[in-house]
Amino acid sequence: MDFSLTPQQLALQDSVRRFARQELPDIARQIEADDEPPGTDLRRRFAELGYLGVNLPSEFGGAGMSHLDAVLVLEELAKISIAVAFPVFESCFGPCLAIAHFGNDSLKQRILPAVCSGETVVAVSMSEPDAGSALTDLKTSAREEDGRVIINGSKRWCSGAGHAEAYVVYCRMSDAPGAKGIGAVLVPKDAVGFSVGQRDHHMGFRGVYSADMYFDDVSVPAENILVPAGGFGKLMDAFDLERCGNTTMSLAVAQSAFDYVLDYVQQRQQFGKALVEFQAVQIQLAEMKMKLEAARLLLYRAVVNAEHGLPSIAESSVAKCFANETVREVTGKAMQLMGGYGYSKEFPIEQKMRDGWGWGIAGGAIDIQKVNIAGALVGRRFNQRAR
Ligand SMILES: Cc1cc2nc3c(=O)[nH]c(=O)nc-3n(C[C@H](O)[C@H](O)[C@H](O)COP(=O)(O)OP(=O)(O)OC[C@H]3O[C@@H](n4cnc5c(N)ncnc54)[C@H](O)[C@@H]3O)c2cc1C
């Protein structure tokens, strides 16, 4: 077993890190201040550098590289901020991967090159007011009629709602109950009957739109069906890769908080010496470092074992859950080690704590991941509805 990155991967990591440190901090600050997503200029710049669709097939405009390469790119960008890295997250780990794996040729040709060139962002819309953790209770319906699909219902918490150019919408596509009736359809933003409500305001994730979305007899061509009823398993397989993107975002936020505070405790003096001289501080640093290393190894294992396919639910859930808990712990410790400065908006840690917290809810709550892990241990899924 070889735990080292290849020379090419080290070079990629280094070049993204240099780019991110040079070009992104001002943009990230602006996004945080205005609460508006990065503009098309930045998306085009990412496209030029090959960061959009790192792991998408080259025939559709991607770089055809591995999921690990995509992790390395995303981590360096998200160390600056999650909002600035969001288009890369969506293109390398979001619904585009489901399109690449399960979409028909027309869908792949129309969507993937546009995503890789920075023209289009595709978001995923699964959650509904009454279907969060209990996702298979979703009610939004899609029925086929004369070569069209007619969609009715409403969605909640979609990251990118109102901003993305297209949405992969999980729908009930047959009368079969629960997961069996679920499929997914691509809905463009300009579809007639599609509308977006007021923006939600989260604790963190500034610059990432979120809102309710409404579908009132929205009609799209049948070729926009990503997977028909019965395809929920496929959607969840692709979502295992999304979980690795979520893990990467968590890890990047945690790592950057750690890097910042490691420097801080060596500079800040109290009782006539640097904070790092106190053993209690040293122990906090060591505990943070242990969690970060473990989170990184779990993430790398999940994506390396997937190669160009999709990761296992067991490995992606373990990685996500651990990184989601790690980012909360590490940003919390970093804030405490910085005292009043950690709590101040003049320093970067409070934003990292706000941004870091959300990943343990997005993409499936931490406890739901733990239930998945236990299910994988005993080789079955636990029925949450059993009484
Ligand atoms: C920042 C952010 C971004 C998001 N982005 C998207 C997106 O792009 N697209 C999208 O479709 N959705 C998105 N979501 C929604 C997200 O997927 C849901 O919030 C999540 O699945 C939880 O659903 P819920 O909020 O309805 O909580 P609930 O399902 O009401 O759960 C609340 C809590 O109850 C507990 N719980 C519930 N059921 C169980 C159980 N069976 N066992 C143990 N504990 C349980 C858990 O602790 C859980 O956290 C996003 C959410 C956030 C916060």
Image: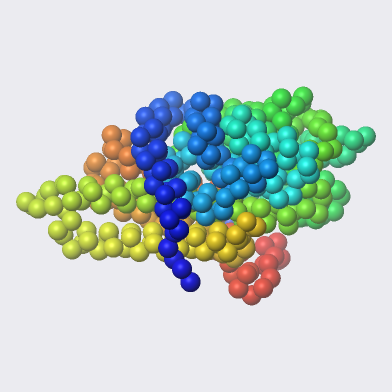
Seen at 70% across and 61% down, the residue is 385
Quick check: 38 left or right of 169? left
Q: 124 above or below 2?
A: above
* Residue 65 appears left or right of 345: right
Q: What is the number of callouts on the image?
A: 0
Tell me which corner region of the image, top left, top right, bottom left or bottom right, holds residue 355: top left
| Residue at the far right in the pictured view | 146
Q: How is the image coloured?
A: rainbow
Residue 56's place in the image compared with 300, above or below, is: above
Nearer to us in this view, 131 or 264: 264
Quick one: which residue is furthest to the front in this view?
7
For the point 51% across and 51% down, which residue is it?
A: 69
Residue at x 18% of width, y 56% of height: 276
Q: Quadrant of residue 244?
A: bottom right
State the image coordinates of residue 52 (x, y, percent, origin top left): 56, 39
Spot the residue most to the left.
Answer: 272
Q: Position of residue 354 (x, y in %)?
A: 41, 43
Residue 371 in view in this figure: no
Residue 176, percent across and down? Answer: 85, 53
User: Which is more toward the observer, 301 or 208?
Assistant: 301
Residue closer to the observer: 208 or 14: 14
- On the picture, is 304 further left or further right than 175? left
Q: Quadrant of the C terminus?
A: bottom right
What residue is shown at x 65% (from left), y 57% (from top)?
A: 309
334 sits left or right of 235 in the view: left
The answer to whether residue 192 is seen in the rendering is: yes
Q: Position of residue 60 (x, y in %)?
A: 67, 40
